[in-house]
Image: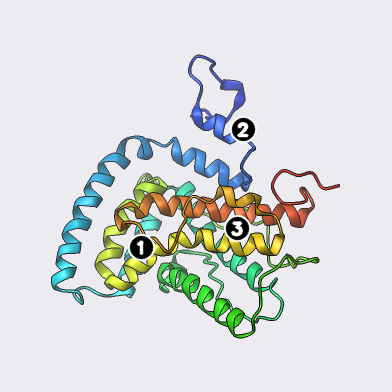
Amino acid sequence: MPNLLDISIHDKRDPNPWLAMYLDSSIPINNRTKQALMHDNNSKSARYLLPLIHFWSMIIMFFIHVVKFFFPKLFNSSKILHRILSWGLRCFVSPDANLLIFRHFHVGSEILEFIAGNIKGVEVQTSPLKPKDFNDVKDDLFLKHDLNLYNFVINLNTQLKEKEITITSVEKINLEMITEDQFDHIDFPNKWTNILDLRSAIELFTPFYQLFLTANDFVRASNSLQLDETLAIYSSQILGTPGHLGLVNNKHPMVPTTTYSAAYRLVLHGLAAETLHEVLVNIKLGNFSDGIMTPKK
């Protein structure tokens, strides 16, 4: 099978849109992540299965919503949920989609550590989530990710208000927690059953998420995606460069949106985390003065 990201096979009369997106450098993103995302977008699963899975997922979520309204404590079990997720990721999700999912927890943890480590006068303990295999998923990985985000915002702002501290730009930025991890140390399964693209996998897993979590946990997980804007603002205040805020699409956390769009917004959430992380990597490596496009003098 030819490499669709190879410029030598470019057909001017039938250009591959994902080749164009891969070659475009306007958005900062880890190259390995970009390759995985473009291959994922171009997969047969994304083109043919996703529309059907999305339709099925919305119908199932509607009926689960009705059942949960009358029986809110029925089927609540985060342990069962994460065993299903671990099994599903290992058996049915493509290597590219698995890479994007696993990498997200590492990137998100480092961003929280960066914010916590660059605000003078506050001490916020973070709980890094850096899964190395599918067994790590079973330890309530996805639920802890959502809880970490909200607890971080609550603990940070409690200290800011109590100590009357304002987040300001830092002259000497601490970037020791930011790594340039290419995920070469994880071998993801690539059997004939590992075909699902990222969005199809999320669409399939979301009804299970809704079924086995409490209503509060599920709604909180969906709304946490809009905290992208909040964390991006914290980072821009520390860096003194608001340019990367334009890369955030999940916005306005005080105005939540429907849970039925969670799958699409979850992919945007992952992209926002990847772009912010790459901004920090660029600054650490000295490639750009603001991490985006301004050459370092």
- Whether residue 92 appears in this view of the structure is no
**Could you tell me the amino acid type at mark 3?**
His
Instruction: Judge whether 197 appears above or below 205 on screen.
Output: above
Q: Are marks 2 and 1 in contact (CB under 8 Å)?
A: no
Question: Which tag, 2 or 3, sits closer to the chain's start?
Answer: 2
Q: Which residue is at a point 78% across and 51% down the rendered structure image?
A: 289
Q: Which residue is at a point 61% across and 79% down the rendered structure image?
A: 160
Percent across and percent down for residue 115 are: 64, 69
Secondary structure of the residue carrying numbered label 3: loop
Question: Which tag, 3 or 1, sits closer to the chain's start?
Answer: 1
Percent across and percent down for residue 142 are: 42, 67
Residue beneath label 1, please? Answer: 85
Q: Nearer the viewer, mark 2 or mark 1?
A: 2
Determine crowd level at label 1: few under 14, some 14-19, many 20+ residues with C-alpha closer than 10 A.
many
Q: Quadrant of residue 226?
A: bottom left
In this view, the residue in front, 72 or 107, is: 72
**Could you tell me the amino acid type at mark 2?**
Leu
Which residue is outermost to the top? 13
- The circle drawn on residue 185 is 3
Q: Which residue is at a point 46% across and 54% down the rendered structure image?
A: 250
- The circle drawn on residue 23 is 2
Between the C-alphas of marks 2 and 1, the distance is: 33 Å
Determine crowd level at label 2: few under 14, some 14-19, many 20+ residues with C-alpha closer than 10 A.
few
Q: Which residue is at a point 61% across and 22% down the rendered structure image?
A: 8
Between the C-alphas of marks 3 and 1, the distance is: 21 Å
Between the C-alphas of marks 2 and 3, the distance is: 26 Å
Q: Nearer the viewer, mark 3 or mark 1?
A: 1
Horizontal side of residue 137 vs 125, given as left or right:
left
- Whether residue 149 appears in this view of the structure is yes
Q: How many marks?
A: 3
**Could you tell me the amino acid type at mark 1?**
Leu
